[in-house]
Image: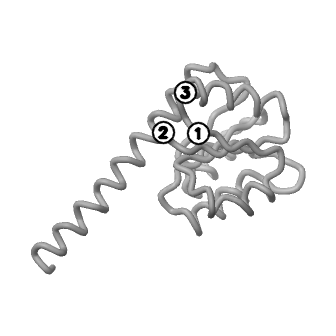
Amino acid sequence: MAKIVIIDDEPAMVEVIVTLCREKGHQVFPFNAAPKAVEQMDSIQPHVVIADIRMETMTGFDVLRHVREHLRQTAVILITAYASVETAVEAMKMGAYDYVTKPFKIDELQMTVQRALDYQAALRENVYLRKELKNKYKF
Protein backbone atom coordinates (compact mmCIF):
# COMPACT_ATOMS: atom_id res chain seq x y z
CA MET A 1 0.00 0.00 0.00
CA ALA A 2 1.49 3.31 -1.10
CA LYS A 3 1.31 6.51 0.91
CA ILE A 4 0.03 9.43 -1.15
CA VAL A 5 -0.11 13.07 -0.05
CA ILE A 6 -2.71 15.17 -1.87
CA ILE A 7 -2.53 18.97 -1.72
CA ASP A 8 -5.09 21.24 -3.34
CA ASP A 9 -6.94 24.27 -2.01
CA GLU A 10 -10.14 23.12 -3.76
CA PRO A 11 -11.88 20.68 -1.35
CA ALA A 12 -13.89 19.05 -4.15
CA MET A 13 -10.71 18.29 -6.11
CA VAL A 14 -9.05 16.81 -3.03
CA GLU A 15 -12.08 14.58 -2.49
CA VAL A 16 -12.02 13.31 -6.09
CA ILE A 17 -8.32 12.44 -5.89
CA VAL A 18 -8.71 10.87 -2.44
CA THR A 19 -11.50 8.64 -3.76
CA LEU A 20 -9.57 7.46 -6.80
CA CYS A 21 -6.44 6.72 -4.73
CA ARG A 22 -8.38 4.85 -2.05
CA GLU A 23 -10.09 2.78 -4.77
CA LYS A 24 -6.61 1.48 -5.63
CA GLY A 25 -5.90 0.65 -1.98
CA HIS A 26 -3.51 3.49 -1.22
CA GLN A 27 -3.16 5.22 2.13
CA VAL A 28 -4.10 8.85 1.53
CA PHE A 29 -3.12 12.03 3.38
CA PRO A 30 -5.29 14.92 2.10
CA PHE A 31 -4.47 18.58 2.73
CA ASN A 32 -6.18 21.83 1.69
CA ALA A 33 -3.13 23.91 2.62
CA ALA A 34 0.42 23.30 1.42
CA PRO A 35 2.26 24.63 4.51
CA LYS A 36 0.53 22.09 6.76
CA ALA A 37 1.29 19.29 4.28
CA VAL A 38 4.96 20.25 4.04
CA GLU A 39 5.17 20.43 7.84
CA GLN A 40 3.94 16.82 8.14
CA MET A 41 5.52 15.35 5.03
CA ASP A 42 8.80 14.26 6.61
CA SER A 43 6.94 12.16 9.18
CA ILE A 44 4.55 10.72 6.57
CA GLN A 45 7.33 9.71 4.15
CA PRO A 46 5.00 9.54 1.14
CA HIS A 47 5.70 7.56 -2.01
CA VAL A 48 3.85 10.11 -4.15
CA VAL A 49 2.79 13.73 -3.68
CA ILE A 50 0.03 15.17 -5.87
CA ALA A 51 -0.04 18.96 -5.58
CA ASP A 52 -1.89 21.77 -7.32
CA ILE A 53 0.45 24.37 -8.74
CA ARG A 54 -1.67 27.43 -7.90
CA MET A 55 -2.56 27.69 -4.23
CA GLU A 56 -2.91 30.72 -2.00
CA THR A 57 -0.21 30.32 0.63
CA MET A 58 2.34 28.15 -1.15
CA THR A 59 2.68 26.96 -4.74
CA GLY A 60 3.06 23.44 -6.04
CA PHE A 61 6.57 24.46 -7.08
CA ASP A 62 7.35 25.26 -3.43
CA VAL A 63 6.09 21.80 -2.46
CA LEU A 64 8.21 20.26 -5.23
CA ARG A 65 11.31 22.10 -3.96
CA HIS A 66 10.72 20.80 -0.44
CA VAL A 67 10.28 17.23 -1.65
CA ARG A 68 13.40 17.38 -3.84
CA GLU A 69 15.42 18.66 -0.85
CA HIS A 70 14.06 16.36 1.86
CA LEU A 71 12.41 13.32 0.28
CA ARG A 72 14.43 12.69 -2.87
CA GLN A 73 12.80 9.37 -3.77
CA THR A 74 9.25 10.70 -3.52
CA ALA A 75 7.56 11.25 -6.88
CA VAL A 76 5.74 14.56 -7.32
CA ILE A 77 2.83 14.95 -9.71
CA LEU A 78 1.81 18.57 -10.26
CA ILE A 79 -1.74 19.39 -11.36
CA THR A 80 -3.11 22.65 -12.69
CA ALA A 81 -6.12 24.22 -14.34
CA TYR A 82 -3.84 26.87 -15.85
CA ALA A 83 -1.73 24.80 -18.21
CA SER A 84 1.05 26.27 -20.30
CA VAL A 85 4.08 24.84 -22.03
CA GLU A 86 6.34 27.06 -19.94
CA THR A 87 4.85 25.79 -16.67
CA ALA A 88 5.12 22.17 -17.80
CA VAL A 89 8.76 22.62 -18.82
CA GLU A 90 9.57 24.34 -15.52
CA ALA A 91 7.89 21.54 -13.56
CA MET A 92 9.91 18.87 -15.35
CA LYS A 93 13.17 20.84 -15.01
CA MET A 94 12.57 21.09 -11.27
CA GLY A 95 12.14 17.33 -11.00
CA ALA A 96 8.40 16.72 -11.12
CA TYR A 97 7.53 13.18 -12.13
CA ASP A 98 4.61 14.41 -14.23
CA TYR A 99 2.35 17.36 -14.95
CA VAL A 100 -1.41 16.84 -15.28
CA THR A 101 -3.95 19.41 -16.44
CA LYS A 102 -7.41 19.89 -14.95
CA PRO A 103 -9.92 18.68 -15.77
CA PHE A 104 -8.32 15.26 -16.01
CA LYS A 105 -9.77 11.85 -16.70
CA ILE A 106 -9.79 9.72 -13.57
CA ASP A 107 -8.19 6.73 -15.28
CA GLU A 108 -5.41 8.96 -16.63
CA LEU A 109 -4.51 10.21 -13.15
CA GLN A 110 -4.70 6.66 -11.76
CA MET A 111 -2.31 5.49 -14.50
CA THR A 112 0.04 8.40 -13.81
CA VAL A 113 0.10 7.55 -10.10
CA GLN A 114 0.75 3.86 -10.87
CA ARG A 115 3.59 4.73 -13.25
CA ALA A 116 5.10 6.98 -10.58
CA LEU A 117 4.90 4.15 -8.04
CA ASP A 118 6.47 1.68 -10.51
CA TYR A 119 9.25 4.15 -11.30
CA GLN A 120 9.89 4.75 -7.62
CA ALA A 121 10.03 1.00 -6.93
CA ALA A 122 12.61 0.62 -9.70
CA LEU A 123 14.68 3.44 -8.16
CA ARG A 124 14.57 1.81 -4.72
CA GLU A 125 15.58 -1.53 -6.21
CA ASN A 126 18.45 0.11 -8.08
CA VAL A 127 19.74 1.76 -4.88
CA TYR A 128 19.45 -1.54 -3.00
CA LEU A 129 21.29 -3.51 -5.70
CA ARG A 130 24.05 -0.91 -5.91
CA LYS A 131 24.57 -1.14 -2.15
CA GLU A 132 24.62 -4.94 -2.35
CA LEU A 133 27.22 -4.87 -5.13
CA LYS A 134 29.32 -2.33 -3.29
CA ASN A 135 29.23 -4.37 -0.08
CA LYS A 136 29.88 -7.66 -1.85
CA TYR A 137 32.76 -6.49 -4.02
CA LYS A 138 33.96 -3.51 -1.96
CA PHE A 139 34.11 -1.07 -4.89
State the image quarter where residue 65 is shown: bottom right
Left or right of 60 in this view: 45: left
Nearer-N-terminus badge (2/1): 2
Residue 3 at what x, y percent from top left? 56, 45
Residue linked to disc 3: 110
- Helix, strand or loop under label 2: loop
Q: Is residue 117 above or below residue 37?
A: above
The amino acid pointed to by label 1 is Gln
Left or right of 126 in this view: 75: right
The amino acid pointed to by label 2 is Met
3D distance between C-alphas at marks 3 and 2: 14 Å
Is there CB contact under 8 Å for labels 2 and 1? yes
Residue linked to disc 2: 1
Task: Single out the residue that lies furthest toward the bottom.
Answer: 138
Which residue is at a point 80% across and 57% down the rendered structure image?
36
Residue linked to disc 1: 27
Which residue is at a point 28% across and 61% down the rendered structure image?
128
